[in-house]
Amino acid sequence: MNTAGTTPGTGPLLEIEDLRVTFGSPGPRGRGRVVRAVDGVSLQVGRGRTVGLVGESGSGKSTLGRAALRLVPVRSGRVSLDGRDLTALRGRALRQARRDMQMVFQDPYSSLDPSAVIGDSIAEPLREHEGLSRRDAERRVKELLDVVGLPAGHAGRYPSEFSGGQRQRVAIARAVALNPSLVVCDEAVSALDVSTQNQVINLLEDLRARFELSYLFIAHDLAVVRHIAHEVAVMYLGHVVETGPTDRVYDSPAHPYTQALLSAIPASHPRRAGTGTRMLLSGDLPDPADPPPGCAFATRCPYAMDVCREAPPATTPVDGGGEVACHLQTSGPTLAGRTLDAAGVRAERDGSPDVVPAAVRDAP
Ligand code: SF4
């Protein structure tokens, strides 16, 4: 699905095409489990843009973020960064490409060595990839601490001496040390209180503008995503079911799953969208090793029809931008590969005689 809002004249920075990631194995006589964590996802992130990736826990959004950085094995499909096919890279070439793409995790402890002072943790990628001398690395660490709003004198402190928000600032300093073009933020503010969340989001925004960064911002909190994302992609059971400009998706969600997620934002929230009617989802996510046929959401969708249980919905453009995969949003029958509206065919329902343009009438 197309989410890229690119700078005019340039292509998307990150392009994911029909990506599939599976875990497990079929085992002898097919008795094993194969989990389809990411099941045919296409997605784009424009230069200097932030794409929010939302969905319930288990929807596959974190796996997609890791697969985009080649941190988990990809079964099939393609990931390109700035036109370079990352899925074709191996060994040293892949390590070098990783300079351009970094990740910020929910728990900074996962990227910071608790036994090392933070100055050494931030300097590590600088020394490894850029071969900086100790003195130059120290100078650069001070600059980076300043960039993320921490005193340079804190370089000699251990992670345990910082608050959660400060630790996340350190993790961000480390992530931007090598001037990447793409940062995947995986629930990067989810563990923080609301006021610290706002500070870290403002910092991410400043850095994006200052260094022309692009973010794939993964979060289950839709209110936070509206704050930071230019475009949004909604994931369900390994599939992207809706994409679009943030305001369009939040103000006029097209997919029933998106409508349900948005209706769960507390009514008191100032950025609450929609009519205020809560749409409760029954049941849990289906087993990703045994997904339902047809639409993956059919087992929980209040609008499910017979066709939903039989055929997966194709993606359809949405008024206002983006795409949706839902049988409710199909554009009707096609003629010579074009929708009737696009072909200029007026149906009898509006009282007009049918008019079939010659180009369509004479098509093979
Ligand atoms: Fe619901 Fe059918 Fe649309 Fe799936 S395709 S979201 S089951 S209406």
Image (cartoon, helix red, strand yellow):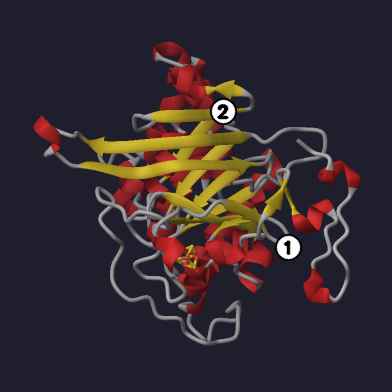
Q: Which residue is mark 1?
A: 319
Closer mark to the observer between disc 1 and disc 2: 1
Left or right, residue 125 beside residue 179: left
Mark carried by residue 33: none
Q: Say if residue 190 shows up in the picture.
A: no
Observer able to see residue 248: yes
Mark 2 vs ligand 1: CB below 8 Å:
no
> Foreground: 110 or 15?
15
Other-residue count near label 1 (Cα within 10 Å), few / some / many at <14 / 14–19 / ≥20: few
- Judging from the image, what secondary structure is the residue with disc 2 in? strand
- Asked if disc 1 and disc 2 are in contact, CB closer than 8 Å, the reply is no
> Where in the figure is residue 300, as x and y percent of width and height?
36, 70
Q: Give the vertical position of 75 relative to 64 (above or below).
A: above
Q: Quadrant for the C terminus, please.
A: top right
Residue 345 horizontal/vertical position (percent): 83, 58
Q: Is residue 34 left or right of residue 80?
A: left
Q: Position of residue 90 (x, y in %)?
A: 41, 15
Who is closer to the viewer here, 190 or 159? Answer: 190
Residue 20 picture quarter: top left
Between 161 and 80, the one lying in front of the other is: 80
Q: Position of residue 28 (x, y in %)?
A: 9, 30
Q: How far apart are labels 1 and 2 at the CA level?
A: 28 Å
